Amino acid sequence: MSSSKHIAVIGAGPSGLMAAEVLAAGGAAVTVYDAMPSVARKFLMAGRGGLNLTHSEELAAFLSRYRDATDWLAPSIQAFSPQQLRDWCEALGQPTFVGSSGRVFPVAMKASPLLRAWLRRLDAQGVRVELRHRWTGWDDRGHLIFATPDGPHTVAADATVLALGGTSWPRLGSDGGWVPILAAKGVAITPLRPANCGFTVGWSDIFRDRFEGQPLKSIALSFRGRSVRGEAVITRDGIEGGAVYALSAELREAIALHGEAVLHIALRPDVETADLIKKLSVPRGKQSFSNVLRKTLQLSPVAIGLLQEVAKTQGLSLSSLSPDWLAALINAVPIRLTGTAGLARAISSAGGIAQSELDEKYMLQRLPGVFAAGEMLDWEAPTGGYLLQASFATGVAAGKGALRWLKL
């Protein structure tokens, strides 16, 4: 049975909906507000290619993915662990499985079946959802103010959970509109920046027009001693993809400090340099040089084009390079990154409410009774299930924190 305590949850993504579930289960009357016409739009978008909920790796390794925020996020993730997230999905009728990479997906793969089951549960708990309600702050009485199609609407809440997301994919709802509202209250906010993002490269027109959208497969990317296996995709303005995202934090920071970063790509990472030299030293006869690279080294057209692009920027002809030089270049192609792709295309964002602003209940110390969760907070993580896991877990933590604060 719900109490007389009314809690407003602002933001109907994974963090907000999870906080709402915890609050309703704890006896609070809960209303979820969202600016969009429907809930969880980014969550649904994430599930289009297969909803990667979490990861199956050992917990200590899992927690290390959060870099500087590991110690901060560890208690919430330990309290709502990857296995608990899987059990929660199972209870909603959506069993999960571990893919070959260790990533965890629902058997249905998509987000929509899970979301539908979740919304049915929330409805049964008595959780109300108010859409097209854009939060604009507080009035002089401390009531929440929302802009709605019918004009301003105020709400008196005994506690509030903010789960408004970061600033990636703003067209889906997370546009960072909360930043000036909280900053005006003195809340310290680390600037929001792209995470798990692509980077800009000054491709030539010829390379850009021919290879835009082409994947580089089975490569290794290296930066400052760290190497990542995977794939990347050539974009019109640069490069993106899973392997790039895995290095995006370090690359972004280097560009911020130095104005550029040089990423190295190994096109044949499983072939030793000596073997490459040997294959490149065989007389090619009447074969064109591109055919030699394609047939002898199994390089794709886009990989060959990348080699030609880099050689050209250095004033060199690829076919004039010695086997030693070319072998070294093939497994260390230098790509000069000049900037990050915009937040509109980033998978997630870095920055947000500083850890120092929150207590152990995820309550803003400057605003008693106001809690925050999810990508609003100053943490970042790679793709692979880590983003959603922390979003769910901090939603649980903020919900439990609000219940404790209200003594429910």
Image (tube, grey):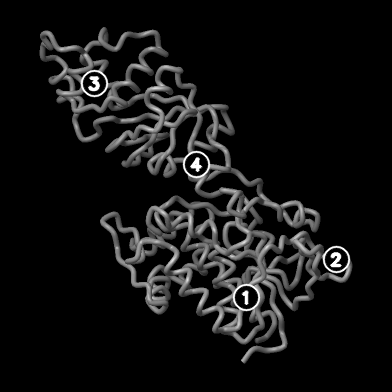
Is 71 or 39 nearer to us in this picture? 39
- In the visual, does 328 lie left or right of 253? left
Residue sitting at 34 percent across and 72 percent down? 95
Residue under numbered circle 3: 327
Tell me the crowding category of disc 3: few under 14, some 14 to 19, or many 20 or more residues within 10 angstroms, Cα based. Answer: many
Residue sitting at 69 percent across and 77 percent down? 7
- Element at label 4: loop
Residue under numbered circle 4: 197
Kind of residue at disc 4: Cys
Of labels 3 and 2, the one closer to you? 2
- Element at label 1: helix
Estimate the x, y position of residue 373 in percent, counting from the top left: 60, 64
Estimate the x, y position of residue 303 in percent, counting from the top left: 30, 26
Residue under numbered circle 1: 401
Kind of residue at disc 3: Ala
> Alpha-carbon distance for marks 4 and 2?
37 Å
Locate residue 231: give its quadrant. top left
Of labels 1 and 2, the one closer to you? 2
- In the visual, does 109 lie left or right of 347? left
- Element at label 2: loop
Estimate the x, y position of residue 122 in percent, counting from the top left: 55, 78
Of labels 4 and 1, the one closer to you? 4
Q: Is residue 21 above or below residue 195?
A: below
Residue sitting at 42 percent across and 13 percent down? 313
Is tag 4's residue or tag 2's residue first in the polypeptide sequence?
2
Residue under numbered circle 2: 139
Is tag 3's residue or tag 4's residue first in the polypeptide sequence?
4
